[in-house]
């Protein structure tokens, strides 16, 4: 299905937000996620179903000074 990830259109196979993170290679990385502008907690990602046209934001913390 076609969804928007961090502003870019992408074709993905994932059915849930948790599956999407795995598909994109985030694995166990600490990231923040939002689905259609609603924050999704890590524990709720397996239940967050994706559908055509959804907008997903994935934010990774940065370190540095």
Image (spheres, rainbow, N blue to C red):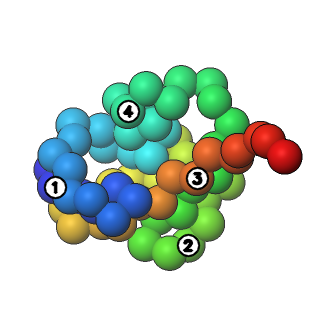
Q: Considering only order in the chain, which callout, 2 or 4, is on the residue closer to the N terminus?
A: 4
Which dot, 4 or 2, sits closer to the camera?
A: 4
Which dot, 3 or 1, sits closer to the camera?
A: 3
C-alpha gap between disc 3 and disc 1: 20 Å
Q: Secondary structure at mark 4?
A: loop
Corner quadrant of residue 56? bottom left
Residue identified by numbered label 1? 2
Q: Could you say where residue 62 lies in the image, as x and y percent from the top left?
A: 70, 44
Q: Considering only order in the chain, which callout, 3 or 2, is on the residue closer to the N terminus?
A: 2
Q: Secondary structure at mark 3?
A: strand
Q: Is residue 18 above or below residue 9?
A: above
Residue at 16%, 55% (x, y): give it: 2
Q: Which mark is residue 33?
A: none
Q: In the drawing, does residue 60 fall left or right of residue 58?
A: right
Residue identified by numbered label 4? 24
For the residues bearing labels 4 and 2, Cβ distance under 8 angstroms: no
Q: Is residue 55 above or below residue 14?
A: below
- Outermost residue on the bottom side: it is 37
Residue at 34%, 56% (x, y): give it: 5
Corner quadrant of residue 19? top left
Residue at 53%, 63% (x, y): give it: 34
Q: In the drawing, does residue 37 fall left or right of residue 42?
A: left
Residue identified by numbered label 3? 59
Q: Neighbour class for label 2 at 10 Å: few (<14), some, many (≥20)?
A: few
Which dot, 2 or 3, sits closer to the camera?
A: 3
Q: Could you say where residue 48 lies in the image, as x and y percent from the top left?
A: 47, 54
C-alpha gap between disc 4 and disc 2: 20 Å
Residue identified by numbered label 2? 38
Q: Considering only order in the chain, which callout, 4 or 3, is on the residue closer to the N terminus?
A: 4
């Amino acid at each position: 299905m076609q969804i928007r990830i961090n502003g870019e259109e992408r074709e993905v196979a994932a059915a849930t937000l948790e599956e999407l993170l795995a598909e994109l290679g985030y694995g166990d990385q600490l990231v923040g996620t939002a689905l259609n502008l609603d924050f999704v907690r890590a524990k709720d990602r397996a239940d967050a179903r994706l559908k055509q046209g959804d907008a997903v934001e994935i934010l990774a913390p940065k370190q540095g000074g």
